């Protein structure tokens, strides 16, 4: 039997998902042994034309990390969709938009103006801007064009499965690889399309060992203002912990270390919008019935939308800020 | 043609929906712009219901529940009372006028008041104009055209 073919690609991402694959340690050798890796620009020398030369559906599995925010990301998403039998959104960027998706709080024009003119370290008296197409004597040069709105992979192409996380935890990647090998080797049935792999359906709180009992908040604090009690729920201590609105699967690493959950695994099963769910959770625990005091407590939440949607703005209900 | 606001209302079963019913039987006149969704309690209104309504074409969302102290489930409306300000703040920071999301208490006997609330809200949203979200839907035709304009393929 010929080896199944594996592709890995990064679009708008930091590269952390690629590192997470390498963090599976010896498993990566097993991956390289079991699969024929046909595309992995981060780790091996491939060109886009190598992918174009493949037949449609020839790649058994593509792990696609990164959000879609440029013409190049979009082209590769469409290309890899066509060439892959199973396309998997790998990591928070592809699944929910993640950190690159914070660009949806502003506009392409504002970002470009800051980077090419306004930032303190920029000297650009001629206001030079990147041009998507530029003719030189040797021929025509082309640059990818950035989009005004960052999209998730699911919004631009048909996606079969999602592996969330920023990045997906190596143990979870190992479990997914084992499941894929089992399916391909032993003819196990595929999970239903759209299944979230390598994570739990329920919230991060389910994995959190901290004690929850009071559920009453009278004021919010920022992490530098408090040395948190090691035993008690961080949200009850007034820290904005995204646990109630975040999918479990990470093993609650951050909260075990005394740092509030930042929400990188995206919304749990049955929740469409992390920020709305967080608004709901916090609204349930504020300890006041006085409208003015409620307003005062809420005003103490630092950077409300930036905190609630840190990892999921493009995939959220409203998708972007109105600018 | 003048702008007719498209409004969604979440009304609690025990007070506000009954109040709206009373407005009908009492022949209270008010604009027909509000599309009413009955919920068991204002505490059932998940903030995402409100965001979803705005994302899918509503120009404003009205949530009505029992007056504080009168909740059929004792404290559901208090939860709503705390969730709505957070939702309004969230909506505001997302660049949408928070006046498009409103919370009002309407009891089962306040049919006239229900009519006034809906009239006032409709006029307020009419003055704010339609809510047209920018680039909400992904436009594959535009993305394909941009790609073609660039020569089609990246190296």
Image: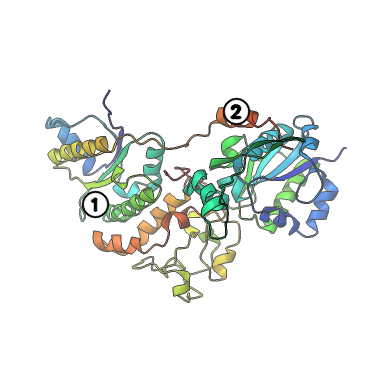
The quarter in which the N terminus of chain A is drawn is top right
Instruction: Give me the disc on residue B71.
Output: 1
* Between marks 2 and 1 in the image, the one whose residue lies nearer the viewer: 2
Give percent across and percent down for residue A111.
52, 49
Whichever of callouts 2 and 1 sits on the residue coming sooner in the sequence is 1
Give percent across and percent down for residue A317.
45, 43
The disc numbered 1 marks a residue on which chain? B
Q: Which quadrant would residue A22 be assigned to in this image?
A: bottom right
- For the residue pair A156 and B37, the one nearer the viewer reads as A156
The disc numbered 2 marks a residue on which chain? B
Q: Residues within 10 Å of mark 1 (few under 14, many from 20)?
A: many
- State whether residue A201 appears in this view: no
According to the picture, the residue beneath numbered tag 2 turns out to be: B145
Instruction: Report, in whole angstroms, how far the alpha carbon at label 2 lies from the one at label 1.
Output: 55 Å
Q: Residues within 10 Å of mark 2 (few under 14, many from 20)?
A: few
Q: Is residue A67 left or right of residue B135?
A: right
What residue is drawn where x is 26% and y is 55%?
A: B74
Q: How many marks on residues?
A: 2
Please determine whether, in this image, residue B9 is positioned above or below residue A10: above
The local secondary structure at tag 1 comes to: loop
The local secondary structure at tag 2 comes to: helix
The answer to whether dots 2 and 1 both sit on one chain is yes
Give percent across and percent down for residue A8.
73, 45
Residue furthest top as drawn: B1
Instruction: Give me the disc on residue A233.
Output: none
């Amino acid at each position: 039997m010929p080896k199944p073919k594996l592709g890995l690609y990064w679009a708008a991402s930091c590269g952390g998902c690629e590192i997470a694959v390498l963090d599976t340690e010896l498993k990566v050798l097993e991956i390289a042994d079991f699969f024929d890796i046909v595309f992995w620009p981060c780790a091996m020398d491939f060109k886009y034309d190598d992918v174009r030369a493949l037949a449609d559906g020839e790649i058994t599995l593509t792990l696609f990390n990164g959000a879609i925010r440029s013409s190049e990301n979009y082209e590769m998403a469409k290309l890899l969709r066509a060439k892959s039998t199973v396309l998997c959104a790998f990591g928070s960027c592809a699944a929910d938009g993640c950190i690159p998706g914070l660009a949806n709080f502003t506009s392409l024009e504002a970002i470009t103006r800051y980077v090419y003119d306004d930032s303190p370290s920029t000297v650009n008296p001629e206001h030079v801007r990147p041009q998507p197409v530029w003719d030189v004597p040797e021929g025509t040069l082309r640059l990818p064009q950035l989009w005004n709105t960052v999209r998730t992979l699911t919004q631009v192409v048909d996606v079969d499965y999602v592996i969330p996380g920023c990045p997906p935890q190596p143990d979870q990647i190992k479990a997914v690889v084992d499941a894929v090998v089992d399916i391909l080797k032993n003819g196990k049935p595929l999970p239903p399309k759209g299944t979230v792999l390598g994570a739990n359906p329920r919230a991060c709180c389910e994995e959190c060992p901290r004690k929850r009992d009071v559920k009453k908040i009278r004021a919010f604090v920022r992490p530098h203002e408090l040395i948190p009690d090691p035993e008690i729920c961080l949200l009850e201590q007034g820290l904005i912990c995204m646990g109630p609105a975040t999918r479990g699967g990470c093993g609650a690493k951050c909260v075990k270390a005394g740092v509030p959950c930042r929400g990188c695994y995206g919304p749990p099963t049955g929740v469409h919008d992390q920020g709305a769910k967080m608004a709901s959770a916090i609204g349930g625990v504020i300890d006041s019935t006085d409208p003015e005091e409620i307003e005062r407590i809420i005003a103490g939440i630092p950077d409300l939308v930036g905190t609630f949607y840190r990892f999921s703005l493009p995939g959220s209900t409203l998708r972007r800020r109105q600018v | 043609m003048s702008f007719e606001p498209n409004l969604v209302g979440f009304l609690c079963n025990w007070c506000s929906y009954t109040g709206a019913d009373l407005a009908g039987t009492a022949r209270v006149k008010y604009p027909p712009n509000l599309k009413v969704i009955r919920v068991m309690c204002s505490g059932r209104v998940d903030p995402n219901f409100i965001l979803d309504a705005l994302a899918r074409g509503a120009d404003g969302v009205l949530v009505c529940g029992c007056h504080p102290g009168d909740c059929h489930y004792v404290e559901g409306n208090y939860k709503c009372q705390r969730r709505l300000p957070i939702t309004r703040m969230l909506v505001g920071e997302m660049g949408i006028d928070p006046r498009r999301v409103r919370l009002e208490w309407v009891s089962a006997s306040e049919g006239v008041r229900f009519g006034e609330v809906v009239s006032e809200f409709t006029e307020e949203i009419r003055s704010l104009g339609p809510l047209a979200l920018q680039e909400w839907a992904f436009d594959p035709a535009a993305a394909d055209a941009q790609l073609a304009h660039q020569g089609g393929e990246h190296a």
